[in-house]
Image (spheres, rainbow, N blue to C red):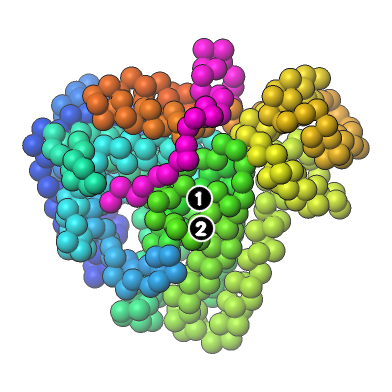
Amino acid sequence: MQIAFDNSFHATMEGFYAPAEAARPSAPRLLAFNHALAARLGIDATGTGDDELARLFSGAELPPGADPLALAYAGHQFGHFSPQLGDGRALLLGEVVAPDGVRFDIQLKGSGPTMFSRNGDGKAAIGPVLREYLVSEAMAAMGVPTTRALAAVATGERVQRERAHPGAVLTRVARSHIRVGTFQFFAAHFGAEHVIRLSDYAIARHFPELAEAANAHLALLERVIDLQCSLIAHWMSVGFIHGVMNTDNVAISGETIDYGPCAFMDRFSVSTVFSSIDAHGRYAYGRQPQIMHWNMARFAEALLPAIHAVDPADVERAKELVAAVPDRFRSVWDDTMRAKLGLGEAAGGDPELIDELFAELERHGADFTGFFRALSMLLRGDRAALDALLPDEGAMASWIAAWRARIEAEGGDFAERAEAMDAVNPLYIPRNHLVEAALAAAEAGDMTPWLRLLETVQHPFAARADWAEFAGPAPEDFGPYTTFCGT
């Protein structure tokens, strides 16, 4: 198999990374390979056997043209600045330019220690690898910007965490792995010259049109703010909780990155937290917009040396952009929710209608994913699904009446509106009880439940009778649910 590497970061950004090598696994075995994504990248895997794929995507064999490196970055972790983090268990093999001209990183995760490992083993266990593969591909299928999973390979070794687990390596694909924390590292350690250089590279790679702006670095800040507002609105619209929104986990490309203790809500609660390390709920479901705002303030701080170098007066403009983040997010959120509710053009009372909906969901603890599909069934004249989610027929009656009145005011065909809702409201998500069962089976050597779940979440919108088991909420005896980082 040939991979046409074109490694711009390695070639032009010396001093922003450290050369690295993968640890050689003892007995690599392919668990999953994403042929559709390989084709998207222009990688022809036709005729490549599982053994060769396992060697190439585990670190056992270096693909020709790869220039392996570990990226340097810092980050605020739970609000506390760590001046040096970096790729402690990841290896950037290189970049490919897809047939449509889009550039992507190909990275091994769990491939062994680097100079940034901070006494860690640099390895990954099979559970976190398969969780990230599953959830990132589900997010992609739902249209949420995200890193992607190209391959998962078992290493044949044991990785010690709270106990010994089978080891594995994930091959992750991203538009790039440049993070807010990347800018923070070079702002903290090297100053304006390095920040300018990194910003210029990021603009040329991701947003070349911004190079013509009066202050391209200020334009970069604004673009990343817009992307993050859109991303977090999309997360919340499908009930996703990232779990560790540290600045080293915020990609400037606007992609979801680093699926650690992430999960999707079943019963709605704005304060939902799944992560075992988030004891105070910093990254709870409802706090994600505020944390995004905080992260964008940290990004602005790191970019200030570059912004100031062009025009000192633009520092005030950067402050204004950060101050406006909550209003920008609210606008995106209202648009996102209008689509979920089958509404078209904006109307004056929409924010109140949306806010009251979430108050009702909180009051009744309704299943978040199922509720929006039940609304579309209600538009078709069938309220059975809605009744199954609420304590009685009168629950939410006032809100439902207001929503229907808003729908009727716009007019149009109800069936078409229901179809439009079903196109943005997933039926199948990686529900926590299904994920845990699939991961447990995979660790025991049976990949069948995981592969079935993967196929389902890769087709999240269209109902299939033989997938009914994947659509319902967790059984009553499941939980409380806790997720773990896996490092």
- Magenta stretch holds residue 346: no
Q: Is residue 452 above or below residue 394?
A: above
Left or right side of 328 for 26: left
Of residues 3 and 484, the one drawn nearer to the viewer in this rendering: 484
Q: Position of residue 18 (x, y in %)?
A: 20, 63
Q: Which quadrant of the figure has residue 416?
A: top right
Residue drawn at the location 28% of the way across and 51% of the way down: 487
Query: Viewed as shown, does residue 143 lie left or right of 190?
Result: right
Amino acid identity at mark 1: Val
Specify the segment rendered in magenta: 461-487
Quadrant that contains the N terminus: top left
Residue 481 falls within the magenta-colored stretch: yes
Query: Badge 2 local density, few (<14 within 10 Å), some, or many (20+)?
Result: some
Q: Position of residue 78 (x, y in %)?
A: 43, 65
Q: Is residue 248 left or right of residue 336?
A: left
* Element under disc 1: loop
Residue pointed to by mark 1: 273
CB within 8 Å, label 2 to label 1: yes
On screen, residue 70 above or below 173: below
Q: In the rendered image, which residue does mark 2 sit on?
A: 281
Q: Residue at x 31, y 80 (%)?
A: 190
Q: Secondary structure at mark 2?
A: loop
In this view of the protein, which residue sits in the foreground, 34 or 26?
26
Badge 1 crowding class, 10 Å Cα cut-off, few under 14, some 14 to 19, many 20 or more, is many
Can residue 115 be seen?
yes
Res. 197 visible in picture: no
